[in-house]
Image: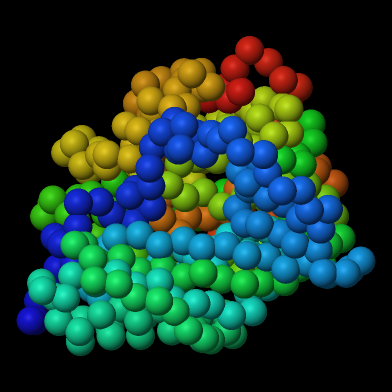
Amino acid sequence: MTGIKLTQFSHGAGCGCKIAPSLLTDILKTSTPDLTDENLLVGNNSRDDAAVYKMDDDTAIISTTDFFMPIADDPYTFGKIAAANAMSDVYAMGGKPLMAIAILGWPIDKLPAEVASQVMDGGRAACKEAGIVIAGGHSIDSPEPIFGLAVTGKVEISKLKRNDTATEGCRLYLTKPLGVGILSTAQKQGKLKNEHATIASDSMCKLNDVGLQLADIEGVKSMTDVTGFGLMGHLSEMCEGSKLSATIEFNKVPRIHEAEAYIKAKCLPGGLHKNWHTYHQNVDLANEAYKPFLFDPQTSGGLLIAVELHATKEVEQILQDSGLESEPFGLLTKSSDKLINVR
């Protein structure tokens, strides 16, 4: 099968496949008391990027998993994006990946094994770039293609970055521009121009390994990655967890400007509307036109970083040297009526 387009074999794409945040809250509700473990430093309660387990006084293990349906038509590219996205959770907590386990679901009656092999090769390439191996995995026959990783990492406890530890006065940074969900939807609808074909995939394939350098900076108070819940969803979690509000300037929010034409063409992912339904009450928008970018579900999106003023120059230099977005777009303030004010 040549010229295959993987996105045509699934109903969703990338992190846009995520269950709506409001529904996920209902799913996670339970009357069963949790087993307590004093060594579990980060669990499910804070909605952070990964679980963190203390091994000794200095070191902790990070454990995470992420998988989804095709976000790209090319099998190799899909595998590379899915792997980069899964490892991002470790980097977002200041950790270093150690190894990965593959998760593969494949419609064996629709797509040949050779295509799945190309997906795996893309995953291996991303892991090789990160310096780790895919050490095993599990596969099933499924109605739609699915690929991802379970990743184990490690972190020095003193350098652990969480999504709920930001402080008032921190400047906000986002290392990758928003809009990949919009471009991916345009691709799935057959509207994406040839000259725009690699913009989203190039962004999504880029590892968030800059998180390792940022972990060394004490003035980086909080960090998370922006994925399926969009910037407003993940910033809401940071603000709620840190008991703060945020004021952001839309014109300074990193965006893929080519996506604006596709917004006009109504190439809006379903996950965008799910995110709006869940998080719009947290956000005071100065202009409704800001909505598509701010609520767009990202796949392998950038790191959202809260940085104390004294550390901003150091952080900006690291981001610039890594070829990433390096201008602050917002400020964390005392808690107010709205979690996020967009001007």
Pick the residue in front: 294 or 161: 161
- Counting the numbered discs, the total is 0
Position in image of residue 148 (x %, y %): 41, 68
The location of residue 88, given as percent across then percent down, is: 55, 63
Q: Is residue 177 left or right of residue 61?
A: left
Q: Nearer the viewer, residue 88 or 62?
A: 62
Q: Vertically, is 148 above or below 338?
A: below
Location of residue 89 by image quarter: bottom right
Residue located farthest toward the right when viewing the structure as drawn? 57
What residue is drawn where x is 25% and y is 75%? 75
State which quadrant residue 78 falls in.
bottom left
Q: In this picture, is 181 found above or below 120? A: above
| Residue 185 seen in render | yes
Q: Position of residue 96 (x, y in %)?
A: 68, 73
Residue that lies at the very extreme toward the front in this rendered image: 32
Q: Is residue 277 above or below residue 182?
A: above
Residue shown at 30% from the left, 65% from the top: 146
Can residue 80 be seen here? Answer: no
**Which residue extends farthest top?**
337
User: According to the image, what is the colour scheme of the structure?
Assistant: rainbow
Q: Residue 213 or 30: which is nearer the viewer?
A: 30
Q: Position of residue 298 (x, y in %)?
A: 41, 50
Judge left or right: residue 124 versus residue 16.
right
Q: Residue at position x 38%, y 52% from top? A: 15
Residue at (33%, 40%) from the top-left corner?
A: 271
Relative side of 183 to 45, left or right: left
Q: Nearer the viewer, residue 259 or 123?
A: 123
Q: Quadrant of residue 188?
A: bottom left
Image-based side of 285 in relation to 321, left or right: left
Quadrant containing the N terminus is bottom left
